Amino acid sequence: MKNILVTGGAGFIGSNYVRYALQAHPDWHVIVLDKLTYAGNLDNLRDVAEAFKGRYTFVRGDIADREVVFETIRQHRVHAIVNFAAESHVDRSILNPDAFIMTDVYGTYVLLEAARELNVERFHQVSTDEVYGDVPEGRSTEDDPLKPNSPYAASKAAAELLIRAYRVTYNLPVTITRGSNTFGPYQYPEKLLPLFITNAIDDQPLPLYGDGMQVRDWLYVMDHVQGIDLVLTRGEVGEAYNLGGENERHNIDVVRMMLAILGKPESLIRHVADRPGHDRRYALDTRKARALGWAPRSDFESALRETVEWYVNNAWWWRKIKSGDFKEFYRRQYAERLAQAQ
């Protein structure tokens, strides 16, 4: 039995990975370490806790807490760490960057120290295409310089540089994946798709930044987690791999598709003031991951429809989220913008 520590495993991509890993690897025991901040939610793992008793353990804790991290790795004799734990929303990084530095940078440092001192066999970092910054043309390759433009992207780039340093200095067995714009079930409704889907269900306005012509490379979450798992188990130590859907879409086109699936009018769209430093386009070259044997399997239109239907059928999950502290964030982020848009 291999013991895999998944940090941030109660979040969006992390919980989907935990579910996938337990199904794909019957000889794995997965330990989730999660602080359960606003985006960490044990409801994301409710079915996992029931289906995989004996092979799944949850530990509540902060990756920036050295004592908790070291004790968890020792107690469970961890073989590998997969680090999803991060503050991840660009808008929140603009409002409150210090939380991003503490979790994404210092927390990664604590995990690296633990992996080094306790001889963990593999450390995998889940990163983002945003570390490359704006890509006006072409596609980013793994050898391109990192040029982050938001506090969030900078915190993820800083974590990557620490990981590189630990590989070079201490010979730590590390790998990195840089994922593109991911969507699917259990995504906290601050991100574009879950926010707009749930708003549209309730006939609420959809605050679309600027002209909506920003380009994102959309990747279904199950394709993303399969790529992460492949790199963790078969990737070359010390290497980074791009995981992109190679499915570029303008934000406004994706929103229009979503509204058509729901049968809602496009009049719900409100063009609001853009956020500062908003990157216009991301695009990834995925040849390196494809050479390893990975490729996205999901058709975008079908995956989008499945995602919309999941939120329609799981209002129990998102309504309690949107009725809590989320309301204050939404007010701070969009109230003035929406008022000016009318």
Image (cartoon, rainbow, N blue to C red):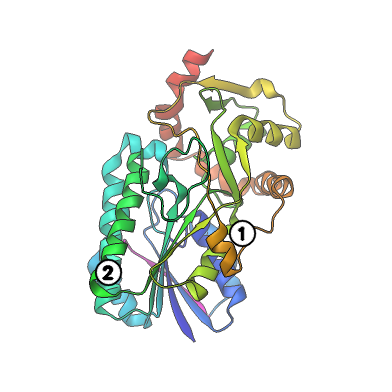
Mark 1 Cα-neighbour bin, 10 Å: few <14, some 14–19, many ≥20: some
Which residue corresponds to mark 2?
Answer: 168
The mark found on residue 31 in the picture is: none
Left or right: 194 as drawn, with respect to 201: left
Which of the two discs, 2 and 1, labels the residue nearer the N terminus?
A: 2
Q: Is residue 227 above or below residue 38?
A: below
Question: Which residue is at 34% across, 79% downward?
Answer: 120
| Residue 46 appears in the figure | no
Q: Is-magenta flag for residue 8?
A: no
Q: Position of residue 332 (x, y in %)?
A: 39, 28
**Which range of residues does the magenta coloring cover?**
54-63
Answer with the quarter of the image where residue 79 lies.
bottom left
| Residue 221 appears in the figure | yes
Q: Position of residue 212 (x, y in %)?
A: 56, 27
Q: Position of residue 92 (x, y in %)?
A: 38, 38
Question: Which residue is at 36% across, 49% downward?
Answer: 145
**Quadrant the C terminus occupies:** top right
Question: Which residue is at 54% across, 31% downward?
Answer: 214
Q: Is residue 234 above or below residue 129?
A: below
Q: Distance of mark 2 from mark 1, alpha carbons?
A: 30 Å
- Please, what secondary structure does the residue beneath circle 1 have? helix
Front-most of residues 180 and 336: 180
Answer with the quarter of the image where residue 151 lies.
top left
Which residue corresponds to mark 1?
Answer: 223
